[in-house]
Amino acid sequence: MAVLDLAFRPTAEGDRSARARLVLAVLAGLLLLIALASLGTGASGVSLLAVAADWLRGEELGLRERVVLFDIRLPRLVTGMLVGAALAVSGAVMQGLFRNPLADPGIVGVGAGAGLGAVLAIVLGGLLPAWAAAMAGMHLVPIAAFLGGWASTLILYRVATRRGRTSVATMLLAGIALGALSGALTGILVYIADDRQLRDLTFWGLGSLAGASWAKLAAAAPVMALAMLATPFLARALNALALGEAAASHLGVPVQRMKNLAILAVAGATGAAVAVSGGIGFIGIVVPHLLRLVIGPDHRFLLPAAALLGAALLLLADMIARVIIAPAELPIGIVTAVLGGPVFLWILLRRRGIVDL
Amino acid sequence: MARRLMNAPRRAGFAVLAGLAMATAPLPVLAGERVVVVGGALAEIVYALGQEHRLVGRDTTASHPPQVLDLPDVGYMRALSPEGLLRLAPDLILADEGAGPPETIAVMRAAEVPFASIGEGYAPQDVIDRVTGVAEALGVTEAGAALAADLAARFEAVEAARAGVERPLRVMFILSAQGGRINAAGAGTAAEGIIALAGAENAVQGFQGYRLLADEAIAASAPDAILMMEREGDHAITDAQIRAHPALGLTPAAEQGRIIRMNGLLLLGFGPRTPDAALDLHRALYGGQGDGGS
């Protein structure tokens, strides 16, 4: 707790960039450690050290070790890092864009749309013609979730854009309406779903990295990576936007272009993240707020720091999820909420009023 | 190292193709000594075949016989964890057709863990086929044939009992009654399957699966008997609650007190105990005139 105390002690006014750089370095180190631990942790008890020792001695890895490391843990590690980073960065971008501490990736309609897509695939997937089912194979649900997320973002964007200007307030409100509509359609599908599909829906909604595979990553990783690579270009503009849209545009920020890029990036990153891992809440809202308390609201540092911390936290949660009730596995959404909720509340209690943008 | 990494997705892809091919090909003869069983009825079949010493794991749906609960639990059959399964170092996984997710099954194939997928269904022949399938996968075809013959004989006894029914009773299976809302079994359910085996008819028609029924639909279905699972705590529904229910209370079942409760896995498992379950239900329905059976 002493470390946290130190971290959250308000600094003198002004430049926090030295501290931000330090935090970035610490987070990078932390992520590396957690990633190694994650590779070495799992229900099967395959140990990274033992495998490394075998490998150094030039021994061929056993099939079981190979499958556990390269078909299970490694794709899971990469998926976890990308998804955690994508959710946290998207959250930070959305909170900056909407100038609203409650904003999270769900706000551009990705969450609700992706959820509807997934439910459609789970409940009605059996009605697809054989050729389509064969093409999508076991990736039908992620594909549908991704398409659903994108479709709802496009609809929201169209609704909120008039004469080339996108109103963030309209988008926020339309997002709520679209969310309710998706919820209702999901409700109809839940009603006609059979028992098994209902269990599938529940598990999907709680999120999991257990289905990670190279095939899924090959599809989702480029989208998430591209979207995140775009966000550093948004940092300065988001900083200016904190002063308000008019002020930002007087400062020479191409506000509309920036909004387009931000919405595109968030829809891509979260759409792909939700598609591969289901509904994982909390990362997108907790990580940026935590970091703002430590390094301040400067997006140049906030965005990369959010990527690192989001990745680290999700990996940590996944490690817990996969060993705590082994050989079974806990949905990761439960772990992120159980861990994140109390910590976040504790911070709010200690530093009441500090959470603003 | 790099080469191995590159191979991983290809291997997984191949495993999926192999899986598709296996779905149509007959099951190969497998003889596992460390078996994980996924599916409550399959676990029962393994015990009925006397092969329980080969089990090293089971899923959450397995609950009979009670000893099966001592085995490590690999989670719900539709949300199996690949590494959790590998931890048990199985050399055979016996799973219901519906087990998943497909990603986990692809990893099992990549790890070259033999995976026997056993079909489902609610007809006597389906149950017998499952027994034969499990026995073949375990390499105990003789015991399998004996159990299958025994099952066939017991199903014949059930059929004989069924033949004596002149007017089939109409039975409503109630899954739950939370807050007075009745969730009943429609067509294509295990409940309908066992009701038919017992020589009765499902009183609830017009939809697939389990649905909440409107009060008017309950009154219109007018069941002669109500069937439920034995439960404790919140889910338990007493006879008094049924009689007090605005729609259920008016049905012939409630008026005659023909309310039957049976163990859930026995009733709906469609495993080796199914003929007994069907006979029990048959007797409860037709045996003692209007006596509740519970």
Image (cartoon, coloured by chain):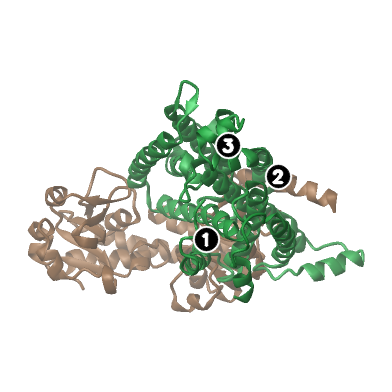
Chain colours: A green, B brown
Circle 1 sits on which residue? Answer: A331
Q: Is residue A111 visible?
A: yes
Front tag of 3 and 2: 3
Counting from the top left corner in percent of width and height, residue B224 is at 14, 58
User: Within 10 Å of the Cα at label 1, are there few (<14), some (14-19), or many (20+) other Cα atoms?
Assistant: many
Front tag of 1 and 2: 1
Observer-nearest residue: A294 or B253? A294
Give the quarter of the image for residue B236. bottom left
Please state which amino acid type lies under the numbered disc 2: Phe
State the residue lying farthest toward the right.
Answer: A57
Question: Residue at left 12%, top 70%?
Answer: B240
Counting from the top left corner in percent of width and height, residue B167 is at 15, 53
Front tag of 3 and 1: 3
State the separation of the CA atoms marked 3 and 1.
Answer: 30 Å
State the residue lying farthest toward the top.
Answer: A163
Q: Which secondary structure, mark 1? A: loop
Observer-nearest residue: B286 or A222? A222
Q: Which secondary structure, mark 2? A: helix
Question: Residue at left 17%, top 60%?
Answer: B225
Q: Which secondary structure, mark 3? A: helix
- Upstream in sequence: badge 3 or badge 1: 3
User: Within 10 Å of the Cα at label 2, are there few (<14), some (14-19), or many (20+) other Cα atoms?
Assistant: some
Counting from the top left corner in percent of width and height, residue A26 is at 72, 62
Circle 2 sits on which residue? Answer: B14
Please state which amino acid type lies under the numbered disc 1: Pro
Observer-nearest residue: A216 or B38? A216
Subunit that carries the residue with mark 2: B
Give the quarter of the image for residue A271. top right
Q: Is residue B192 above or below residue A181?
A: below
